[in-house]
């Protein structure tokens, strides 16, 4: 017997974890004033880029003495730039509990060839953060985008640390309260945090990180696109809107629109509240159904943006195939797009619950998830 479909559909079926849903107010015509066909070095271009930097500072509460730069190649480019410029001066400790953190480990060990201490945890778990030696330089992701596991707070990072902390915060910024006094390098990308367009990264440096840049020269050559110093001094222009390479002014305008929307929703506090409300809806659903659970085992380290789920029903013979089939049913019905687990992660689903997603859409999608599950269980039974 066919399983009845729910009556209500999400107004927006986009629950991808990157690029993420645009802000609810997005309208392409609102980008009409972007200075297209103009040099980004012209006054109008530099003004828009500087506005993007300073409005980011204001919304996230970044200290005035921290430098903020717009750099190429998204969060990946920003974090690579930080590692290639800063690491090697002190012993390094690499922390990883999902695929992106593991990627940074690979680059440090195999590309930079540093003798790093590597600490890892399985998907759904997190390393012992209190056991980290913060007199070393420490690299980590604040939020494991592909595991749904986040750092609960910065309490374990000592104020008197000798090393630098390098934090990939690409799915944490604008949804979690980042302790800037504990972070020396922070990176994120527009396409995750606020549904911006891709290929632009944000690089945020503490005064301690700047001091390292001006007092240490890496043993390896730096490509032009990575260079942050000249003659032993920080290239200050990078942090005033004078980008290393040519940015898309259309993307910049789009990011400024997203920042305006974030401000109208109560700034950082409002963004966190929106993400928390979305995650609360998923949590209530999981608690009411015994065939699905969070990949993250500890509620204290459970992400409120990239929410990763696993199927736990004993009737499921092929976990990966089942999860893909459920995601496909939801995609075909235009209910939930791009919610399959990341390719390197355990089989399951990944639902973006960041601030640009409306809670009403999450609530409308979840009954369809139950429908897709039951339909696939029935199909599996018929095929047996």
Image (cartoon, rainbow, N blue to C red):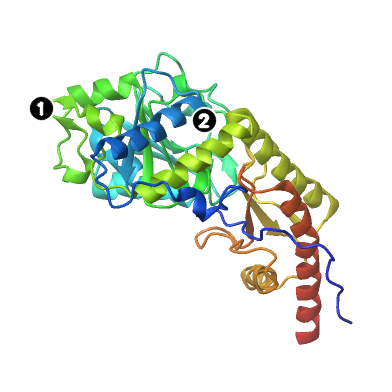
Q: Is residue 86 above or below residue 252?
A: above
The residue located at (73%, 59%) in the rendering is 10
The residue located at (77%, 68%) in the rendering is 373
- Residue extending farthest to the bottom is 383
Q: Position of residue 84 (x, y in %)?
A: 25, 40
- Residue extending farthest to the right is 1
The residue located at (89%, 82%) in the rendering is 1
- Asked whether 218 or 179 is in front, the reply is 179
Q: Is residue 266 above or below residue 330?
A: above
- Asked whether 371 or 359 is in front, the reply is 359
In the displayed structure image, the side of residue 110 where residue 293 appears, left or right: right
In the displayed structure image, the side of residue 63 where residue 219 appears, left or right: left
Contact between labelled residues 2 and 1, with CB atoms less than 8 Å apart:
no
Q: Quadrant of the C terminus?
A: bottom right
Mark 1 and mark 2: Cα distance apart in space: 37 Å
Give SS at disc 2.
Answer: helix
The residue located at (45%, 31%) in the rendering is 56
CA neighbours of label 1 inside 10 A, class few (<14), some (14 to 19), many (20+): few
Q: How many marks?
A: 2
| Quarter-of-image position of residue 252 | top left
Q: Position of residue 113 (x, y in %)?
A: 24, 45
Residue 18 visible: no
Nearer-N-terminus badge (1/2): 2
Residue linked to disc 1: 231
In the displayed structure image, the side of residue 19 where residue 272 appears, left or right: right
- In the rendering, which numbered label is found on residue 31? none
CA neighbours of label 2 inside 10 A, class few (<14), some (14 to 19), many (20+): some
Residue linked to disc 2: 129
In the displayed structure image, the side of residue 244 where residue 64 appears, left or right: right
| Quarter-of-image position of residue 183 | top left
- Residue extending farthest to the top is 160
- Asked whether 283 or 127 is in front, the reply is 283
């Amino acid at each position: 017997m066919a399983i009845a479909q729910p009556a209500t559909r999400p107004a927006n079926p986009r629950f991808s974890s990157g690029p993420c849903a645009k802000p609810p107010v997005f309208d392409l015509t609102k980008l009409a004033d972007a200075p297209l066909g103009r040099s980004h070095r012209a006054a109008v271009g530099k003004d828009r880029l500087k506005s993007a930097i300073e409005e980011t500072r204001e919304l996230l509460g970044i200290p005035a003495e921290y430098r903020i730069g717009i750099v190429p190649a998204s969060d990946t480019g920003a974090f690579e730039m930080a590692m290639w410029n800063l690491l090697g001066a002190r012993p390094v400790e690499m922390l990883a509990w999902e695929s992106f953190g593991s990627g940074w480990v690979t680059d440090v060990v195999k590309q930079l060839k540093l003798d790093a201490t590597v600490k890892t945890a399985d998907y759904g778990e997190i390393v012992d953060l209190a056991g980290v030696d913060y007199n070393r330089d420490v690299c980590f992701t604040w939020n494991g985008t592909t595991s749904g596991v986040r750092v609960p707070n910065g309490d374990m990072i000592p104020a008197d640390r000798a090393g630098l902390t390098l934090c990939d915060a690409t799915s944490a910024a604008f949804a979690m309260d980042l302790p800037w006094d504990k972070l020396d390098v922070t990176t994120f990308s527009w396409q995750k945090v606020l549904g911006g367009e891709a290929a632009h990264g944000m690089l945020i440096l503490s005064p301690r990180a700047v001091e390292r840049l001006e007092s240490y020269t890496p043993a390896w050559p730096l490509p032009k696109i990575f260079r942050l110093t000249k003659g032993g001094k920080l290239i200050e222009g990078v942090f005033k809107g004078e980008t290393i390479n040519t940015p898309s002014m259309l993307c910049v305008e789009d990011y400024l629109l997203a920042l305006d929307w974030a401000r109208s929703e109560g700034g950082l506090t409002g963004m966190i509240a929106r993400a928390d409300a979305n995650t609360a809806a998923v949590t209530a659903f999981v608690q009411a159904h015994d065939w699905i659970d969070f990949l993250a085992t500890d509620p204290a380290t459970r992400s409120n943006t990239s929410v990763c789920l696993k199927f736990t029903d004993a009737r499921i013979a092929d976990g990966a195939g089942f999860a893909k089939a459920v995601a496909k049913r939801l995609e075909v019905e235009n209910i939930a797009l791009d919610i399959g687990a990341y390719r390197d992660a355990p089989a399951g689903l990944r639902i973006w619950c960041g601030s640009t997603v409306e809670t009403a859409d999450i609530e409308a999608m979840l009954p369809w998830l139950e429908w897709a599950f039951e339909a696939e269980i029935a199909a599996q039974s018929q095929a047996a």
